[in-house]
Amino acid sequence: MTVLANGWVKKVSVTPPSLEDNTADGDRLERALMAILKTEMVDIDLSVLVNLPELLRKGNYNLRCVLFKDHKKWCLSGISSDDTDRLTGLAVDLGTTTVVLRLLDLSNGRTMAEYSFSNPQISIGPDILTRIHFAEKENGLETLNSLIIDGLNRAIAELCRSGNISPYVIHLISVAGNTAMTHLFLGLNPRFLIREPYILVTNRPGCLNARELGINANQSAKVFVFPNTGSYFGGDLIAGILYSGLNRSDKTAILVDVGTNAEVVLGNKNWLVACAGAAGPALEGGVTKMGMMAGPGVIDRVSVDPETGLFSIHTIEELPPRGICGSGIIDLAAVLFLSGMIDIRGKFVPGTCKGKLKEKDGLKHFVLVPANKSAEGNDLSISQADIDSLIRSKAAMYTILETIASYVGISLAELSTFYVAGTFGSLINPHSAITIGMMPDLPEGTYKSIGNSSLEGASMILKDSRLMDEIDAIRNSITYIELNVNQDFMNRFSAARFLPHTNLSLFPSVKSDGLVKNLKVVTPVKTGVQK
């Protein structure tokens, strides 16, 4: 079995005691660890010391030790005298909407199991702002903290049941989440995150004890929480940068993570610039009544047959359609535009909509799936107001990209790679996003979907002890741009509120003369980061 050369599990041989050397067991182990790690101190948890005498002698003074280092301080978080004992770690993507866990074998880095669940704080509010305001009420913060900790513990129990192991064998936990979710997870007051001058309780929670947080794991388990850069740029993005390798690249690239906000990082190994803006909800699927997060039965792709002009949809798991997610909405908007059913302002053109327009509550609705073909017996349609909202969001998305590139004095055409993270990134069709002017007109090979980069970055930390210093280097190299006070952003935004843009030279590949013959029937690009 492959053993991780730079992992956190180390084999340690301790010199047996004698009448000539009656050093205490704990001191004896610490001395052996200090020699191996070339450090002057190793912190040994009391719960480890409880079992140390028996395990030392049972293993003939040979132990497997689970270590962790943060702020240049080494900690011992677990010991075993048996080479067959499971020593595991848990990576957590602490999402606002969905929480994802991955259980790993710390010895070889193998993924043992994964589990995801809806963030139980949604019962308080679907968005961060609602939760922060709730936290200000009496017992509000305690309630929100209990919801997420209890949810994690239920998920840990389920993971362990599926793997036929005990939570006791979980020795390390890495957590990556946005700034607000990190505060709620730690039980820290998020009140001042949303009030000028937008101050955090702490940017770098560091390494904590699982038992102090109420997490069901080994008594001495350590929890590493990825650091934040500011109110709107959290540890999930730090983890994403780590996974993408953006900070190690000679060439300038960009990383976009679309969730509650659109968060963007531009740079290379020498510098990183970041910003965030409110382009997320519409692009996640919140633009329309039929919009929803990706899931079974949700439309993720839309195309039109160039010969017949008939619409074709694809649903996740190929179930009857019940809604549409962000990638499907972008596909739909691109198809409507290229076929002349909406004009450059995004307004419906009744003469080319072929009887698919309905009037409802004083608004025009384009019916994508009639009631008799939908899962729940309702028309799945997009209204003029929905299209208008999408155009505002796509304009915000493109303007964020244009503004951050302009800030460092480059054009978007100079980017070597365009990383797109999250579920949105794994489903999006770059051609459709380019068609509506949401993303720059780059060769489609430039776009790389990297999936759940937050979870992947959190997993990397559990496999390679050398990356801890890299996390600090990433955080320290980021320059954050505040878009709320950026006049350049507002000027550019107005120009981007057309399809694809008022400056058509920015989108030379987009051809639209209102004819279906110009449509390209495409499928999402399946790419990823090679490690």
Image: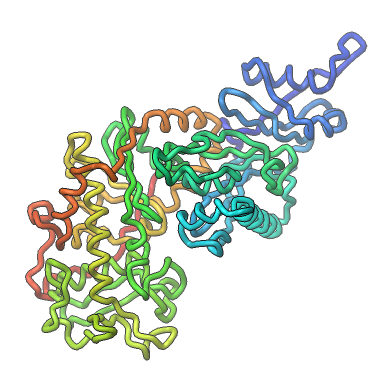
**Residue 266 in the image: x percent, y percent?**
29, 39
Query: Can residue 152 be seen at all in this image of the molecule?
Result: no
Residue that protrudes farthest toward the right in the picture: 19
For this rendering, which residue is in front, 310 or 290? 290
Classify residue 513 by image quadrant: bottom left
Residue name at image x 55 percent, y 51 percent:
136
Q: Is residue 350 above or below residue 436?
A: below
The residue furthest front is: 138
Residue sitting at x 42%, y 38%: 230
Q: Residue at x 58, y 56 (%)?
A: 114
Query: For this view, does 492 lie left or right of residue 214?
Result: left
Residue occupying the far bottom of the picture: 372
User: Is residue 509 something that shows in the picture?
Assistant: yes
**Residue 514 pos. (x, y %):** 9, 73
- Which residue is nearer to you in this view: 185 or 61? 185
Report the side of 515 relative to 105 (left or right): left
Q: Which residue: 56% across, 52% down?
A: 135
Which quadrant of the figure contains the C terminus?
A: top left
Picture coordinates of residue 518 (x, y %)? 12, 70
Q: Quadrant of the N terminus?
A: top right
Residue 39 shown left or right of residue 367 in the figure: right
Using the image, determine if residue 47 lies above or below residue 256: above
Judge whether 77 appears above or below 93 on screen: above
Locate residue 254, reporting x and y percent. Answer: 29, 43
Q: In the displayed structure, would residue 241 be above or below residue 366? A: above
Observer-nearest of 293 and 242: 293
